[in-house]
Amino acid sequence: MRKLLIIIFTLLIKCTFLVGYEINELSTLKQIFIPPSMSEDGKSFVYTGSSYNDKYSAIFVSHRLENDKFSVPEVAITTDHLITGINEKFQCFFPLCGKYSAAGFNAPSIKNNVITFCSPLKNFKDGIFYAIKKANKWVIYPIAIQGDHFHKKTDISFKSFNSPYLTTENKAIFLATLDNQIDVVCSVKIEEKSKIRLLHKSSRKLCDFYNISVHRGTFATRAQAHDGRDYIYIYDPKKYSLVRMKSGSLNSLYKKHKITIKGPSLFAGKIAFSAYIKDKLNQNVYAIYTNAGNNDLAKTIVKSNKLIEPLNIIFDRVWNPTLFVKNGIVYISFAGYLKESKYFSGVYLAKLENGKVTIDAIAVPGQKIGKNKVIKSAKIGAVSLREGIIPLALKYRNNRCAIAYVKIY
């Protein structure tokens, strides 16, 4: 108990000096299942949680207003909504299990009045869906459901899904695994009875696709090459192929260590990603890399087990980056766990300008933002930064949850 009090006191002192951004709380609720994820244009964000009466699991949306603030989140879809053409209802709005069950990577996506999402049904089959707001009412359509044939001319079926990401072209791009263990990335036009189009599939030379990041109609993914190593690939729509990102100065690291790469973040053809290696003591060392801002991957943007000045903190883990570039400045939002509070995440921002990296704290454990509101943990979604906005999922010491956002410029 005394050790816990010391940790809390230390965090309270640290966060007094750490944070320089105003947190704008929008609403509170009992549970947040999947943290908020931004639309590509930065005009909306979407997340899942318990409905206001705690009766249903729900998908919430918030939109950017004319005064540049965000609206109080509203319920768009609940588990009680009917699905057009299917005699089933939703089980919940968080992944129950499976390859793509990591909450941060299975976030709903939004563009204007369209939402795409993944959800298990009452019959426990996973499915991917889109909803369109018509006459102030959300109408839901299925894209694909577990067990559906991948193609009319084959008996191969969908086994599991990652949530579809909406593009500026009003298409949804999604990652799925078939029942023959092949990973596929597909796209579908958001309209009724639109056919699913295969973009790429895994093979002996390239397999184990892990998450995708979508920007401007194309996508990036982490995959395992024939040499057993993880690499980042970007899809070239003109060549219908995945192109390996040039590893630059990472090559020497590849020769010495086995690098485990997690999900990438794609923005305007550039990449940020988190990865970890085993050190001499067989402990994981985490880092975030990017090739944006003329960085050739020689320099880590942020790294665990290293003192971060002037914040005077040491990260235990860093992960889930989102890349954004504005006026030549590279911004990367990410989740970080400190050595002294490795079970509670905070949200941080890395800035790369003229070759120099600075780290800012956005929302951290121990931070007080109002009366009886002290942050226990802060989380971000799959796309956590667009047009200067970072939406947040907060949990307070009293175990109430809140949705908030921060403007970084």
Image (cartoon, rainbow, N blue to C red):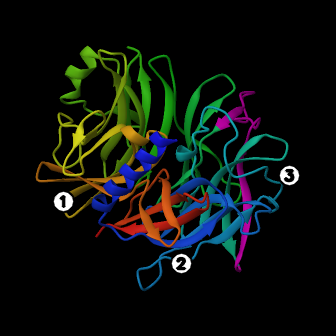
Q: How many numbered marks, from 0 up?
A: 3
Amino acid type shown at disc 3: Glu
Amino acid type shown at disc 1: Gly
Q: Nearer the viewer, residue 119 or 167?
A: 119
Residue on which disc 1 sits: 328
**Residue at 83% in and 56% down:** 85
The image shows residue 63 at horizontal and vertical percentages of: 52, 74
Q: Looking at the image, can residue 235 be seen?
A: no
Disc 3 or 1, which lies upstream in sequence? 3
The image shows residue 256 at horizontal and vertical percentages of: 25, 15
Q: Looking at the image, can residue 206 be seen?
A: yes
* Dot 1: element: loop
The image shows residue 82 at horizontal and vertical percentages of: 82, 61
265 drawn magenta: no
Q: Identify the residue at the far front of this view.
A: 2
Residue on which disc 3 sits: 88
Amino acid type shown at disc 2: Ser
- What distance separates the C-alpha of mark 1 from that of mark 2? 30 Å
